[in-house]
Image (spheres, helix red, strand yellow):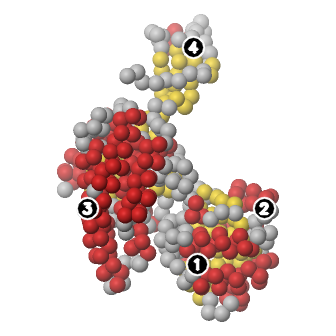
Amino acid sequence: MADDIKAAAQVARQAALQLSQSSEEERNNALEAIAQALVANQDKIITANTRDVDTAAKRVAEGKLGAPLLARLKVDEAKLEGQIVVGVRSVASQEDPINKTLTAIELDEGLDLYRVSVPIGVIGVIFESRPDALVQIACLCLKSGNAAMLKGGSEALYSNRILAEVMIAATAGLPGIPEGWMHLLEAREEVAAILNLHDLIDLIIPRGGNELVQYIMSNTKIPVMGHADGICHVYVDKDANLDTAKRIALDAKTQYVSVCNAVETLVVHRDIADDFLPVMIKTYRDAGVEVRGDASVVALAENIVPATEADWGTEYLDLIVSIKVVDDLDAAIAHINTYSSHHTDAIVTENKQTASRFLQGVDSSSVMHNASTRFADGFNYGLGAEVGISTIRLHSRGPVGLDGLVIYKYVLEGNGQTMGDYAGEDGKKFTHKKLDAVWAPKK
C-alpha cells in the first residue's frame, strides 16, 4: 500500500507542476464542469449518501457514533444544489490567487524584482465525515493551482467515492487540468503512508479532533496547518443588550451544534448575571440544551449540572453548554485565553471601549463583537469556501480560503547584470526603488 500511495503522490507532484502553469480561465472552466456534473449525477450521489447515512444511523442507535454526525453526513437535493454546487461556483468567482504581484522593487535600472504568488504544491487533507468538505477542499485546491490528496472519514466512504469519481471524470481531458490533480484515499493505513512523504507532499491540513491532529503533528516532517478543537466562547458584558445577548448565545450554541464554531462556554459578567442567566438558562433548556455551570450559576437555577475543570476545556459538539460567571472584563479575557482553542470568541456589549479591549486582548483567529461565533466560516467571510480553519501562526489564520493555499516566489528580471558589477568600493549601488509594476507570465 505504501508503494501505491507514493506512486499516487508522485503523480500528484507532476500534476501540481502543470496546474501551476494553467490559466485562470482553464481552472474556472474545470470548476464549472464540476458544478454541472454534480447536478447531473445528483441521484447517484444521494443514493450513495443514503447508504452512508443508514449505516451511520445504526451505529448511532448502538451508541457507537454521536448523533450530531448524521447532520454533517447527510446530503439531500437541497444541500447538493443549494450549498455544495453554489460553493463550487463561488470558488470559481473568486479572484485568481496565483500569479499576483505582491511587491515590485527596482534593484537598479533594468534590474527589477517581483514577489509573485504561487501554489503551495501538493496538499494532503484529512477531514471529518462531511461529504461537502471533500468538494470544498478539492475545488479550493484546483482554483489555487494545487494538487490534492484527500482522506475523508470512513462514515462517508460511499459519498466521498462517488463525489470524487464525478469530479475527476468532469475534469478529465480539459485544457490545463492534468490527470492526477485529485486523489481520494480511503483506508486508514493510507494516512500513515502519506505522513512519510515529506519529499512529495508540501502541506498537511487535518480537519478533525485533537487526537487526530496531535497524531499527525507527532508523526510527520510535513508542515501541518489546522486546528485541534473548536472551544469557542461568548462573553456577555455588563453593558450588553440582554435581548441581543440571548439571541447570539442561543444561535451560537444551537444553530448548528456539531461544528467547530459553535459556542461551548458562555461567560457572563457578574453584574448582570441575576437578570440575564435565569432567562438564558430557560431559553437553552427550551431548545434542549443541557446547562452546566460554576457555583454562581448553580445558585441561580435548579438542576444545573456543576461544571468541572474539564468542562472549560471541552468541545462538546452537542447540546451542552457550560456557563462561567466572572467579576470583570479582565477575568473574562483571562478565562478565554486560558481555555479557548483560539478558534472564535465573541463579546456582546454596547460599550465600544470594552469591545475594543476584548477584540485586542483575546488571542483567537476570529474575534467578534455583537455577532454569533457561527459567522466564522470561509463562505461567510467571502472566501468562496474554506479548506479548514487554522489556529496556528503560519502564513494563514482563521478560515483558510484561496489566499491560504498560496505562497510566493521571487522573480528577478535583468538584462545581463552580474553580482560582480556591485562588488567592492567602486561597485554600482542598488536603488531599491518601489515600483508600480506587475509581473505576469507570458502566454
Residue at the disc numbered 3: 44
Give the Cα distance between marks 3 and 1. Answer: 39 Å
Of the numbered discs 3 and 2, the one sitting upstream in the chain is 3
Q: Kindly report which numbered mark, 1 or 4, lies closer to the viewer in this rendering.
A: 1
Residue at the disc numbered 4: 108
Residue at the disc numbered 2: 354
The quadrant in which the N terminus is found is bottom left
| Rendered image quadrant of residue 53 | bottom left
Residue type at mark 2: give it: Thr
> Residue 145 location, x and y as percent?
38, 39
> Which residue appears farthest toward the top when viewing the image?
426
Residue type at mark 3: give it: Lys
Q: Kindly report which numbered mark, 2 or 4, lies closer to the viewer in this rendering.
A: 2
> Residue 231 location, x and y as percent?
55, 68
Q: Kindly report which numbered mark, 4 or 3, lies closer to the viewer in this rendering.
A: 3
| Rendered image quadrant of residue 199 | top left
Give the residue drawn at x 30%, y 70%: 50
Q: Is residue 222 visible?
A: no
Of the numbered discs 2 and 4, the one sitting upstream in the chain is 4
For the residue pair 89 and 184, the one nearer the viewer reads as: 89
Residue type at mark 1: give it: Val
Q: Is residue 103 above or below residue 45?
A: above
Give the Cα distance between marks 4 and 3. Answer: 60 Å
The secondary element bearing badge 1 is classed as: strand
Residue type at mark 4: give it: Asp
Name the mark on residue 321: 1
The quadrant in which the C terminus is found is top left
For the residue pair 17 and 382, the one nearer the viewer reads as: 382
The secondary element bearing badge 3 is classed as: helix
Q: Do tag 3 and tag 1 residues touch (Cβ < 8 Å)?
A: no
The secondary element bearing badge 2 is classed as: helix
Of the numbered discs 1 and 4, the one sitting upstream in the chain is 4
